Every structure is written in structure tokens, then in C-alpha cells.
Image (cartoon, grey):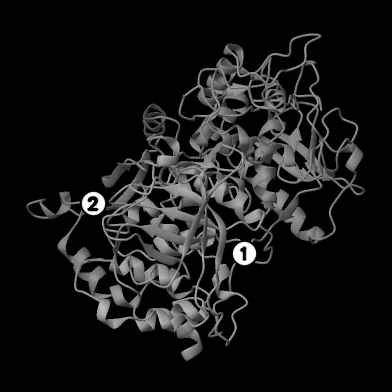
Amino acid sequence: MCGFLSYFFIFFSLLLSVPCFPARTLPYPSTELTDRTDNNTWRDFIKFLDAGRGSHVSGMSELKKYFQRFGYLEQVPESNPTDAFDDRFESSVVDYQKTLGLPVTGKIDSDTVSQIMAPRCGVADRAVHVTGRYAYFYGEPRWARSSPMTLTYALSPGYSIDYIAQSDIESAFDRAFSRWSAVIPVNFTAAEDYWKADIKIGFFSGDHGDGEPFDGVLGVLAHAFSPENGRFHLDAAERWAVDFASEKSRVAVDLESVATHEIGHVLGLAHTPVKEAVMYPSLRPRTKKVDLKIDDVKGVQALYGSNPNFKFSSLLQSDTSSSFGETSDAIDGMSHEVRKPNFYALFDRNLWKVRERKETKDNEEGNCLVLPDMFKSTYEAITKGNPMWNSLSVPSSSLHAWDPNSTYIHEPPYLKDMTMDPLGPRAVKDAYCLLNFGDSITTDHISPAGSIHIPAEKYLLELGVHPKDFNSYGSCCGNDEVMVRCTFANIRLVNKLLNGEVGPKTIHIPTGEKLSAFDAAMRYKAVGQDTIVLAGAEYGSGNSRDWAAKGPMLLGVKAAIVKSFVRIHRSNLVGTRIIPLCFKRCQDAETLDLTGHERYSIHLPNDVFSIYEPNELDDEQYDKSCCLQVELTYFNHGSYDIWHLIKQ
């Protein structure tokens, strides 16, 4: 028997077991969404992740109401939406994905559910008229005024917000209007009399009398009505910001960005599928999007013409258009000044000015886009940083200031509530088997480092992280909330509890439900129930990643009972107070007829150091021996992290 088992007895016992279309010119049917002050409804849509045709999930009727509200699903008279994902709803999902430039799968995939949950404008996407590449309201309404056109605007004196200075609010709207007046021959001026202004702006809450009730934080941000209505309403429940440096709220929404978008509606523009454009329907918290793109400019100029002082050259170095065709249109519209012999590079649909062209005798250097001196000058100063890097604010404190908004660095729970006194051994009683593996389970099986999947995917989506910003498990190793969810989440795992089925699932023994390892572990932890892992030979092979031990610890795993360990992983398990146990030689779970449906108890001696037997150590890579004395010290104190911190 291995060192641990020579002192422990393992006892196995069998288990006995609102109207839907703002900014409209024609009446549309009304659809009411559940109105909650914090808009939990949209965040609840995460539960429909990966739903597709044939699915039947409780609450899907609310998701269908969302699609009705924004013009993708026609409301059937005298019929309420059901929870069935039928052919008709699949067509609506495909339409939604095409309209908003998402991958077309017909399923509620991660990109789609992330877009659905994103805060957005209340104007419907499909109640529009498309002319060429640009979308307008039906009839292409526009303001009819004598030229030069001047429109007045005013902020409601009675419906405003008090946590931002009035002057800052006015400045944000002034900048937003100026962006549009720079590209069309329309001037915007602030009016003193709110009721006489062409455009009336106010912050309202809930049902505010226009038939378009707001729904709380991070739902519908604002809505505006088409020309020449002039009403422009923002949801007062949002946490509006004009400066993210001073406004630290995770749910803060940039006022100028939303104002710029809604002014586009006031002028007659509908939503665009170009994600980079101002007129794209959604805006995530703490995001600023105020620069008009070619799609925005050409759309509004089709209604009002071009400002005589505007030149497309001002957009070329920073704009991203909806297609290469639009980039070509922009190049065709360049002024003679821009057509001077300079170098431009087309990269990721952006036209970038590289440098002034230099005429040389043989013209060779003049035709090079990258010169040797560029490398020399760059790498000579590489250790000096750059103005942006050097201007970063660095805290003077010697202690790290944990940022609760960070999805990369999070204060881990095992550094909290530390004590100077050793915790001592802890027995395991009536534990359930969380997973039952065969041989050669690697640390990558236990804690993968690749692309992020459920349940970590679900966690990040709930925080408002877009799938394109997920990065990888390896990049999130500073966030225990991500890493615990990726533990045993390798898609190639084979768990004997699932009779050979491949994938990151397990069986919750008390209920028989098939769940992710994380969800099952949380079920056990919620009722204070210990868990163990069964495995074969060479458990923990591969590289020595620490999260292959810390992850199971955070899942509540108290012991790993295997045929043999890779020594360094065995040592890491001890450092996280997971008891590493080996079967007797020539024995394993199968020879003992252990299925993983049993209950497991492990009794430890009061003096954990009595386990130490130096004569049993050998030089084999796959260690079957007892722990080293220093490892027992770690185990006795609770973890190697705590022991080293105490020593320091």
C-alpha cells in the first residue's frame, strides 16, 4: 500500500440510494417585455446558450418577445409566444444574425446571446426602408427646412439627472450635434425655450407616456423618433458618464456616444449592420463610440447632402467601412490633395497613410514601405517605453489594489482568512465521486489552456464580455472565477460515470443529472458535501500547471485516489490540501469493483507528520510513495501559498 494508505483507512459504502418599435412613422403592434428595474430579463437569456431548433426551454417565450420588439418576429394576433424553438423562430434568429453581422448558425450561439444581452437602442432594427446599402425609416422622412438649415435643440428642465454637472451634459450633446453638422449642411443650436425647440431631449424612467417604456439598467438605453417628430429620450435608470476616469461604475454608459447615435435617428437614419459604425444598435458599458464612419456619413448625406467643407480624406486614416466596396467608394471620393504621391496601405479594411513619398535618384528607397532605419530607431529606444506607456498611472502602494471589475485578475479565495496557526489534518466523510477517470489524465485534461467554453463562457457573458474578447484559459489564469470553471472542462475528457461518453460532463450522483463538472461540484458544495476523484495510472502527467491542483481544490475535491501520480502533480495536490492516495500494487478501481457511485471516507491521524516514511521514497517519475516532510508541512498549514507567506 502507498504511504498514505498505510496510515489511512478508506471506507467505501454503496450509496442508497412596451410597444415594440420606437422611432417609427407608422403604428406597429405592441409587445410587452417583463419590466424589471435592473433588466434581469435580458441577462437571464444566457440560459438559452446553444439552444436550437427543437429545443424547449422554460422562458423562451420572453426571448421571442425580445425578437418581436425589435422587428424580427411577427406577432401573431390572439396568440402568445411559446417556449418551443420552432422553424419560425429559427428563421427569426437567422434574420437577426444576418442583420447584425453575426455568424449565421440559426442557433443561440455565444455571439448571438452576447449581442442579445448587450445594452442597445430601443429603435427596432427591421421596421425600416433600405435604399442601396443604407437603412432609413419608412418613407425616408427628413427635416424640411430652408437652406441653410438650422435645427434647434433643448434639454428638458424637469427631466434630467443630477449627478453630472449640467454644463458637462450640455457639452456632451454639443459635441454630438457637431459631429453630424460637420458632414451635412445642417446647423444645430441650443434653444432657451424647451417647448419651442425642434429636438426635445430628456431623461425619463419606465413608462413615461410615449408608448415606449424603459426597462431599467443596461436594457434599452435610449430611443428617438423619426423626422420631424424631434423627441429624444434617454433612460434615467442608466448610470450615465461623460468621463470614465472619474466614473468607476461597471455599468456606466457613455452619454456622448448614445447622444451621437440617437441624433442619427432624429435625422432619419435607421440601424446599420456595420459594427464599427455609430448607428449600430448596441453599445456596451464603459465603451465610447463617437466617431462617424463612412457608413454613417454616406447614409446621412444621402438625405441631406454634404457639408461643403467636409472631405472624405478626414475619415480615411481611421474609418472602417462595411465592405471593401465601400472603401473603394471612399477612395474614389478622395480630394486631389489626398491623391498626392503618398503611400497608403489597406489593412483590415482600413486605409492608413504610411508616410510621405520620398523621391530618390534610383527611386528604390522611395518605393519601400519599411526602411532599415525604422527598425534601428525603434529597437534602440525599446526599453524607454513610449509616452502612452510612461503616462500610465501606477499605484504607490506596495499592496496590489484588487479591481472588482477585472475579468483577468481577481482576488483568490484561498488568500482570504489566513491564520498563523496550522489548520491540521481534516478527515473526509461520506464523499461523493465527482469524476471517475482511466489512465494518463494530464494536467491539460484537468485544467485546459485553450479557447474558453461553457461554463466559463457563460460566466464571462454574464459579465458583459463579448466572445471576441474572451481570450483563452491561459490568459485568464489570474482570475480564479474563470479557472475554477475551466477545471475538468477539457472537451476530450472521458468520464466513466458517463459510460465512456467524451466531453466535460459528469453525473451528480444524488439526482442522476448530467451536469458540467463545475455545476455538479457547486451542487455538492452548496450542501457541504465532500467530493473525491478516481483515476488510473500516471495521473497529472504533462506540464506542472498549478491550476490543475488549485482548480479541483476550489471545486471542493478533498482527495484523489489513483493508481499512480506524476510526482510534481502529487506535490501540488498536497500543497492545496487535496489528499493524494494510491491503491495497493496491482489494484485499481476496476479490480476493486468501484464504479464511482459509492461513498468514500478517509480518516487521517491527528499528527500528520507521522505519515512521513523516507525509506519509501524512490526515483521513479510516477511516484507511489508517501509525501515529503516539507509537503506535509504545507498540508498541515493549509497550502504552500499560506506557508510561504507566513514564513515571510
Q: Amino acid at mark 2?
A: Arg
**How many residues crowd mark 2 within 10 Å: few (<14), some (14–19), many (20+)?**
some
- Quick check: can you spot residue 411? no
Q: Earlier in the sequence, mark 1 or mark 2?
A: 2
**Residue 167, above or below 133:** below
Q: Which mark is residue 627?
A: none
Quarter residue 221 falls in? top right
- Quick check: can you spot residue 38? yes
Q: Nearer the viewer, residue 599 or 562?
A: 599
Query: Which x, y percent locates residue 418?
Result: 59, 80
Residue positioned most to the left? 362
Residue at 51% over, 76% down: 638
List the residue tagged with mark 2: 357
**How many residues crowd mark 1 within 10 Å: few (<14), some (14–19), many (20+)?**
few
SS for callout 2: loop
Quarter residue 186 falls in? top right
Q: Amino acid at mark 1?
A: Pro
**Residue 208, above or below 161:** above
In-image side of 399 versus 193 (left or right): left
Query: Which x, y percent locates residue 447?
Result: 40, 55
Quarter of the image where the N terminus is located: bottom left
SS for callout 1: loop
Query: Which x, y percent locates residue 6?
Result: 38, 71
Residue positioned most to the top? 77
The mark total stands at 2
Q: Which mark is residue 404?
A: 1
Residue at 37% over, 83% down: 629
Front disc: 1 or 2 = 1
Q: Nearer the viewer, residue 544 or 65?
A: 544
Residue at 60% over, 61% down: 405
How far apart marks 1 and 2 lie (CA) works out to 49 Å
